Amino acid sequence: MAHFLIWSSLAFLLYVHFGYPLLLDVWRRLAGRPVKKGFWEPTVSILIAVHNERDTIEAKLLNCLGLDYPLEKLQVVVVLDAPTDGTDAILGRYETGAVSVVTLSERKGKAGALNHAVPAARGEILVFADARQLFERGALRELVANFHDPDVGCASGELVLLDENGREASDGMGIYWRYEKWMRAQEARIHSMLGATGAIYAIRREFYKPMRPDTILDDMAVPMNIVLCGKRAVFDGAAHAYDRVSASPEIEYGRKVRTLMGNYQLLARMPELLSPIHNPVWLQFFSHKVARLLVPYALVVLFVANLFALNGPYLVLFAAQCSWYLLAGVGGFLSRHSLAREVAPVLIATTSSKRKRIAT
């Protein structure tokens, strides 16, 4: 029994991380469905939900208004989700024909704020964006070109993570994000991606379905609703948005936890995604999303089963697992220790400054 559990767990883990990507590559080569992009200029509304974004909102507005797209066909809708830092005062200077502001007196969260933004939008195409990331000048035109294909209901651009030197990040986070984008691109060339990039994605207006205000991952709920309606959700690597890679392991850990919880929430609220009858990308969804949620349990089964088979090659496997977890623990400790060294001087300087002000 222990040997069966070991080999079945190993097979599952190998499929998730290596077998499925290989399957996607072969599938795409044999039965890929290219998007029929074409030049056209429909009316477009860019929707941005913000809370406290005083330091970024002005740059974002200027970025949107400076895109390579006819200004008379472009609208920027900013939803103020009960800000407390003066973001509303900055927006007041930009509220013109091209910029519409929707003000909420109570916090609704991103999903709830977007529900209030859509009725104020005039565009045939809705583009969802965040305040922090900036679009490449031609990104909107590239994104909109995908909707020339009548089968496309959602199109996601590519988020490029930059390091401190302004180059595409090549550290652990940067490499993982490149791998994830590759997966999305392969899935989209077969049929549909399983989640958009929240910083830059677009949909046909008629396919927007109001979300429950506490929805965690709008960039998964919206595209998957469209896929269930029979349309494609595609990935376009020519439509770029830019962001800085996070330097804080704690921030990145928080994002991962949020994504994990969002996946569980999505499964609970859209169980039809687990049905091969209703979900046209069921195999991709199970392999990419559901199987990843099961990976920690497979690792536990592998480790525990290995305790009952500590001879020959199984002993080597057990030693490899122990070494892997030990290295992960040491890496986590060093990462937190390094962050503490960086933050400590700032805290000391701040405390010293406060003491001087009090003394005077």
Image (cartoon, rainbow, N blue to C red):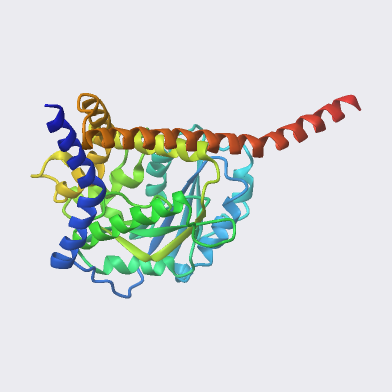
Question: What residue is rendered at 28% in x and 50% in y?
Answer: 223
Give the answer, above or below, for where 144 lies relative to 231: below
x, y percent for residue 282: 15, 46
Q: Where the C terminus falls, by quadrant?
A: top right
Q: Is residue 93 above or below residue 329?
A: below
66 left or right of 149?
A: right
Write down the quadrant of residue 160 in the picture. Answer: bottom left
Question: Total label count?
Answer: 0
Q: On the image, which quarter does residue 148 sit in?
A: bottom left
Q: Residue at x 16, y 61 (%)?
A: 27
Residue 150 image offset from top left, x and y in percent: 21, 65
- Residue 356 in the image, given as x and y percentages of width and height: 86, 30
Q: Position of residue 188 (x, y in %)?
A: 24, 59
- Residue 256, quarter of picture: top left
Q: Is residue 121 visible?
A: no
Is residue 115 shown left or right of residue 152?
A: right
Does residue 348 appear in this view?
yes
Q: Nearer the viewer, residue 106 or 62?
A: 62
